[in-house]
């Protein structure tokens, strides 16, 4: 894998955000490309006057003042990103984007091997949730696999592949395997939810496929409600990565829809590899 594209908003960039992209770059001995979206005008923030007659009347901060602050943060974040690359010995190519971030990422993903994003990535001051609205819009539209990174990133020591017997889940597993051959010696757990182990669709076919790439494979049946069981299985995991297929195209997408603390991107703290045919 040679073309890793990392989408960054320098305005919100933190030093710890650099760990996992750098880790993947070293793992694949590949160049890391950071796409920096231009600072956009932040939403005007309401303030209240001391007018005795109209004490609740709203005013807004001048757009020019907001732009100046945003541009300063953008430049500071970009400089910090460059310093992180230098300190870690990572070959980093920086490109600047413009226009609508979502539209540009759909185009960029057409020509990338993998897109990296943090689960809270946003370009709007009003979008401060995890996952952000931007991430939820990007996932079903991306033209290549997307790796969603949580805040607390660690080295990967085990893999979890979700499998429902459909082509989309096999496609995601296969794409992950092709992109990360370096993980061939890690333990792999196939998470599935049939009535019995004998009911796992095409189990032998999948096992044959994976045995050509991995040496330690286990099938684990999720009992009870599949969605809740998956959450319970993944919540305590660290140093792991999980694959999902067909985001937005079948019921697996319910894991990512907003439901407070039950949202899987909010609850679990491991990277998610998401793609669709």
Image (tube, rainbow, N blue to C red):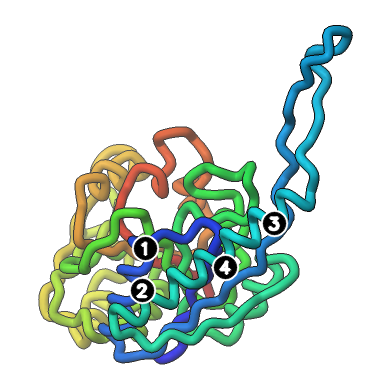
Dot 4 and dot 2 residues touching (CB under 8 Å): no
Mark 4: few/some/many CA within 10 Å (<14, 14-19, 20+): some
- Nearer to us of marks 4 and 2 is 4
Q: Residue at x 13, y 80 (%)?
A: 185
Give the alpha-carbon distance from disc 1 to disc 4, as whole Å. 14 Å
Give the alpha-carbon distance from disc 2 to disc 3, as whole Å. 24 Å
Res. 11 image quadrant: bottom right
The residue where tag 3 is placed is: 68
The residue where tag 1 is placed is: 15
Q: Is residue 81 above or below residue 271?
A: below
- Nearer to us of marks 1 and 4 is 4
Q: Is residue 205 left or right of residue 158?
A: right
Pick whichever of labels 1 and 3 is earlier in the sequence.
Answer: 1
The residue where tag 4 is placed is: 75
Callout 4 secondary element: helix
- Nearer to us of marks 1 and 3 is 3
Mark 3: few/some/many CA within 10 Å (<14, 14-19, 20+): few
Q: Residue at x 49, y 35 (%)?
A: 259
């Amino acid at each position: 894998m040679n073309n890793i594209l990392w989408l960054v908003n320098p305005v919100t960039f933190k030093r710890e955000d650099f760990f996992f992209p750098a880790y993947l770059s070293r793992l694949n001995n590949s160049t890391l490309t950071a796409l920096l979206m231009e600072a956009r005008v932040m939403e005007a923030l309401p303030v209240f006057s001391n007018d005795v007659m109209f004490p609740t009347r709203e005013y807004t901060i001048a757009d020019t003042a907001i732009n100046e602050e945003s541009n300063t943060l953008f430049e500071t974040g970009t400089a910090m990103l460059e310093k992180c690359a230098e300190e870690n010995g990572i070959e980093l190519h920086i490109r600047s984007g413009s226009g609508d971030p979502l539209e540009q990422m759909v185009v960029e993903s057409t020509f990338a091997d993998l897109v990296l994003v943090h689960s809270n990535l946003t370009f709007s001051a009003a979008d401060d949730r995890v996952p952000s609205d931007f991430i939820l819009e990007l996932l079903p539209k991306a033209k290549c696999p997307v790796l969603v990174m949580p805040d607390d990133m660690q080295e990967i020591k085990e893999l979890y592949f979700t499998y429902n017997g459909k082509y989309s889940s096999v496609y995601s597993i296969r794409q992950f395997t092709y992109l990360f051959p370096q993980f061939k010696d890690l333990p792999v757990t196939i998470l599935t939810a049939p009535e019995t182990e004998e009911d796992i669709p095409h189990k032998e076919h999948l096992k044959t496929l994976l045995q050509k790439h991995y040496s330690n494979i286990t099938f684990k049946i999720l009992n009870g409600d599949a969605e809740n069981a998956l959450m319970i299985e993944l919540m305590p995991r660290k140093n792991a990565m999980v694959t999902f297929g067909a985001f937005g195209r079948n019921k697996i997408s319910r894991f990512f829809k907003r439901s407070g603390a039950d949202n899987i991107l909010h609850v679990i703290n491991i990277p998610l590899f998401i793609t669709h045919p």
